[in-house]
Image (tube, coloured by chain):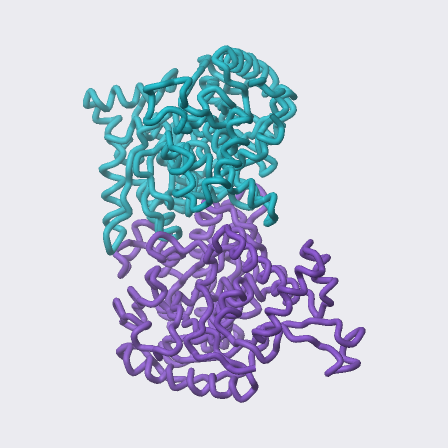
Chain colours: A purple, B cyan
Amino acid sequence: MTAPPHEAHPARPGRALPDTQQGMRRRNLARVMHTVSAEGPLSRAAVASRIGLTRAAVSTLVDELVRSGLLEELGPERPGRVGRPGSALAVSAQGPAGIGAEIGVDHLAVCAVDLRGRVRARAVRYGSNRGRSPEPVLAQLTGLVRQVVSEAEAEGLWPAGIAVAVPGLVARDGRTVVRAPNLDWHDADLGALLPADLPPTVDNEANFGALAELWLGDGTPRDFLHVSAEIGIGAAVVFDGRLLRGTRGFAGELGHVPVHPDGPDCACGGRGCLEQYAGEKAVLRAAGVEPGEDRVGLLAGRAAQGDEDVRRALREAGTALGIALTGAVNLLDPEGVVLGGALAGLAPWLLPSLREELARRTAGPACPVAVSELGPQGPLLGAAHSVVRAVLDDPGALARQV
Amino acid sequence: MTAPPHEAHPARPGRALPDTQQGMRRRNLARVMHTVSAEGPLSRAAVASRIGLTRAAVSTLVDELVRSGLLEELGPERPGRVGRPGSALAVSAQGPAGIGAEIGVDHLAVCAVDLRGRVRARAVRYGSNRGRSPEPVLAQLTGLVRQVVSEAEAEGLWPAGIAVAVPGLVARDGRTVVRAPNLDWHDADLGALLPADLPPTVDNEANFGALAELWLGDGTPRDFLHVSAEIGIGAAVVFDGRLLRGTRGFAGELGHVPVHPDGPDCACGGRGCLEQYAGEKAVLRAAGVEPGEDRVGLLAGRAAQGDEDVRRALREAGTALGIALTGAVNLLDPEGVVLGGALAGLAPWLLPSLREELARRTAGPACPVAVSELGPQGPLLGAAHSVVRAVLDDPGALARQV
């Protein structure tokens, strides 16, 4: 297979395909890909019976996907690996890869995930990005992307697209960071600062974290609220397996839900917002801990050692989270709440008071609160997998270009 | 046209059609219906050009819809009414009708709406339903339904389905009222109490009010939060033109969002919920007004006369609504908020403090708040139109049965 040029990036997720013969063919290509991805290796006959098309129709679709390098036949070339030789199909381990990138306040990270969902290359650079302007940060990120892409290419993969997670509000154009207070970025067009041969999709880290939870989490419901934190507190609302983005793309600002409406002023213009009680700065202050590197690790360490000031600060943050989540749960009636990002690491000390608050404010059974197993890895994995999902959701878009 | 039996009720709204030739045909029938409904009268050629199918394909679809009584030809039979004779199609004014019903705390109402969206028959019965058991209330409602159906039939319409709005939480089965505190109903299966020949869809009145706003409101955005009140305060979240129902069907409980978390106990199990500040009972108490008939009219009348106690009570309710809505807006980033139901009638005295609170808690431009023009009619109209929309969304389901 020849690697296509980097311009070949897939459709944005969720794009509706037109209701024509051509659209139907592309939807059927997607059904084949998803079926093999979820249940493979499978024979053509098994795929046909699962999606309710004829064996002949499926063979035509499969041929196209094999030709484009999206599916591979585990056939006579690899005897003994599965059932009867030549009969089984699998998602390709050497086709397109999703490149995920994360701009954190204290680090940059990039990874490549293949169509089977495995991380095949990864690069991280630690160091504060707070107050740096976007240009040098993006230049550094581009270096990491080049490094990861080159490692992936050495394994026979090629980049199908890149998605970038940022700790801030992103416009619905999927490239402009409107506001990232902890980086001090405003109206930064990241699309213009990343390599032109690999146009990125930029999104909020809480959104990518929630999508990672939806796609990779064990038993994650399809209707849930994902609460995460890096420095600020963000949330993402997933309903019926879809991310609710909001009109401007700003949905999920749980950090600015009023908890005590007459409480301290907040930079958002409000008063007594959740971030004034459960944001990193507020917790560090309440715990009497000096801000430094790896603040979450520091808080977790002290709490584990029994530091009563830290434990009290986290308990109170949990109570404030419980009040804000009571409102969110009443409004949205999700199947569950998942704590991700930095909150996952602090869950042992946040959860008891959070759950207590939710329970005492609810007449019936309280909404279940779980802790993400992906934790801080969520946003990076979610970004990479969003590219992979876009390929699975519309393989025809790539197949035509190959 | 022969009226089909009452069992012929359409698909529930939002049901996805399968991705087959048959499904594609039904989606195309829906596109023809929606196009003629939105832009008719239209010629077959005009429909074809608008939906991008050939004239021949459209003619086949149109013939089926005319045969089923869903479209009518404004042809030679009605010369002079539109353009060239025989050329124009319109949605039928004598085909199926949507029956909407509303169970209010103080009234029952039923109406019939034709496919053109016009109310063709209506019946109302005033009198408190508080504390009455579901059986006699539903028997009375059934009487009103029979009366409205018979009036509609006299005009050549036939009922395509019935939808019932209730002031309470409805399970996702669309027939069981889980909890309607102001009626004192719990786990009441209304489906079993309505005529078997016309199986109903039951939903919360705030949901139907929001749908009415979406479908009938002038310039209503596709992403909005609809806040309404009868006795309690409800809300409905509409995103991308879809109602967000929640896992159990309980989404939109804005009335139980904590406003002052240490405030008075609430029947929901919480403390300081919005309903403790802006619910009808709380406002009447704060205003020093005795509960009686037409409480909204009473409050509005006194406020208009300059009663300072009533005005202060409504101002404070507006502030509480503003705090709760700040949280909701931060979480959902809607394009706007619409005040409906009883709140619409009190808007002149609620809105200033509500808007001020939202604005002072928001750094950028505050989310716009509009007042519904449908007001208390919203839920009943939303119910009837939900049946009409189901016919427009899947006319093939009815066409097959006719």
Regarding residue B230, the answer to whether it shows in the image is no
Q: Is residue B75 above or below residue B235?
A: above
Q: Nearer the viewer, residue A95 or B255?
A: A95
Q: Position of residue B165 (x, y in %)?
A: 49, 27
Residue at image location 52% in from the left, 13% down from the top: B153
Residue B109: image x %, image y %? 46, 18
The answer to whether residue A61 shows anywhere in this view is yes
Total marks drawn?
A: 0
Q: Residue furthest left?
A: B306
Q: Nearer the viewer, residue A68 or A319?
A: A68
Residue B252 image position (x, y, % from top left): 45, 41
Pick the quarter of the image with the N terminus of chain A: bottom right
For the residue pair B387 and B282, the one nearer the viewer reads as B387
Q: Is residue B19 above or below residue A14?
A: above
Q: Residue at x 30, y 38 (%)?
A: B219
Q: Is residue A381 left or right of residue B348?
A: right
Compared across the picture, whether A6 is left or right of B298 comes to right
The image position of residue A192, as x and y in percent, is 30, 74
In which quarter of the view is residue A164 placed? bottom left
A175 and B30: which is toward the camera: B30
**Residue A196 quadrant:** bottom left
